[in-house]
Image (spheres, rainbow, N blue to C red):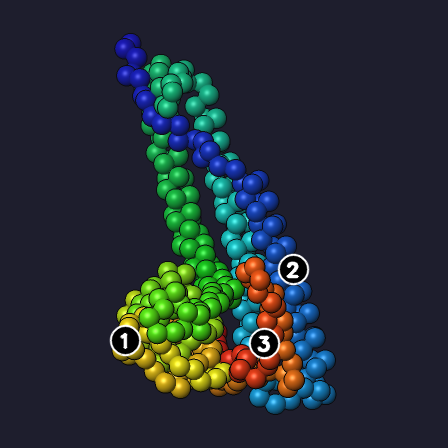
Amino acid sequence: MTEPDPITTADLWDLKTDPARLDILAGTWRGLGAEVGSAEGLINDAAHAVFSKENWTGDTAASFNDHRKRLTADVERFGRWAANVADLLSYTATVLRVQQGLLDDERRKLSAVPMVTGLDSLTFRPRDAGQASLVTGAISVAQEIRDRVDEVLAEKKRDMNFYENQFELIAKEWKPRTLRLLNLNIGQGAGNSPGDSSGTDSGDIPGIAQVIADQDADVATIQEVFRHNTFDLEEELEERTGDNWEVRFEEASKKYHASDDWPIIGDVINAPFGNAVLVREGDVIEGAGDNEKVKLDVDGGSITVPANEPGAGDRRIDDGEGRSAAGTEVRIRPR
């Protein structure tokens, strides 16, 4: 009697999975969910101790409490979803164990059939038609089992993708927000005499705007600037960054603003001179609020500047020229 032809197939009876590892991951997620739930309780208990007896009231308290409620709602949601992920992983591990057991049972039915193992395949050599039928039947059943496994894994993958997206949304919502601050003394008080090009003049404003733009600053504090140049600086910044900038200027004194030209073309008499705060609107900053001048002069105060050349004596500078600082409120967008 002629033996049936060999039957070659992939190893359908080994899922090549690691359910034990999924169980470990499930335990990790379950523990994380419990820790998150504990953190939510700590936040709420601490807040209750403050708000229950009206120890803190007013607009700031209400704003904080709204912020706390949003935070703890997301914390609670994260903890609940972490537990769901743990259950999902445990269920998947169980499915893989059960289905692998069924495949093992089917594979044992072929133990009497001669078989050769290849690099990525199995070749059965049935001795008769009965063994050939046994092999083809086992292959069919194994494929059905694997199809069921694939359906379950596809469903659980969709579930996992849902939780992944939700976790990413929570992470984005509570991601730390940063501001980039640049402090710059542009020195318009230096070299401020007709024909002297050593200081910063109106023609240097575009270059200063480029420095601020290159640093990707959100807030720039500027010292020694003439007010009429802040308008140009604002325009230059908006052109270079494409964003809206608000400029808050506070006068320290009035000065004669000399240009580089000689004779005195473009000079400004009694020009307001002081400090400016430049605020860039964006994802974090909503805009600039109130501003104020902080006077730094001390009546009767003075400083002594050491001589900087041979034969020259120390020089005393009395307060009264208009030393001051500018303070500006920066409004942050609520989360």
Amino acid identity at mark 1 = Pro
The label number, if any, that marks residue 35 in the structure image: 2
Q: Is residue 217 above or below residue 30?
A: below
Using the rendered image of the protein, determine whether residue 244 is visible from the camera's viewpoint: no
Left or right relative to 208: residue 304: right
Question: Residue 82: percent from the left, percent from the top?
Answer: 55, 58
Q: Which residue is mark 3?
A: 317
Amino acid identity at mark 2 = Glu
Query: Crowding at label 2, few (<14), some or many (≥20) Cα neighbours within 10 Å?
Result: few
Residue at left offset 48%, top offset 26%: 108
Q: Which residue is mark 1?
A: 263
In terms of sequence position, does the residue under pointer 2 or pointer 3 come before the other?
2
Q: Is residue 100 above or below residue 72?
A: above
Question: Residue 330: percent from the left, percent from the top?
Answer: 48, 78
Query: Crowding at label 3, few (<14), some or many (≥20) Cα neighbours within 10 Å?
Result: few
| Secondary element at image label 3 | strand
Residue at left offset 47%, top offset 68%: 185
Residue at left offset 42%, top offset 75%: 225
User: Which residue lies most toward the front here?
Assistant: 311
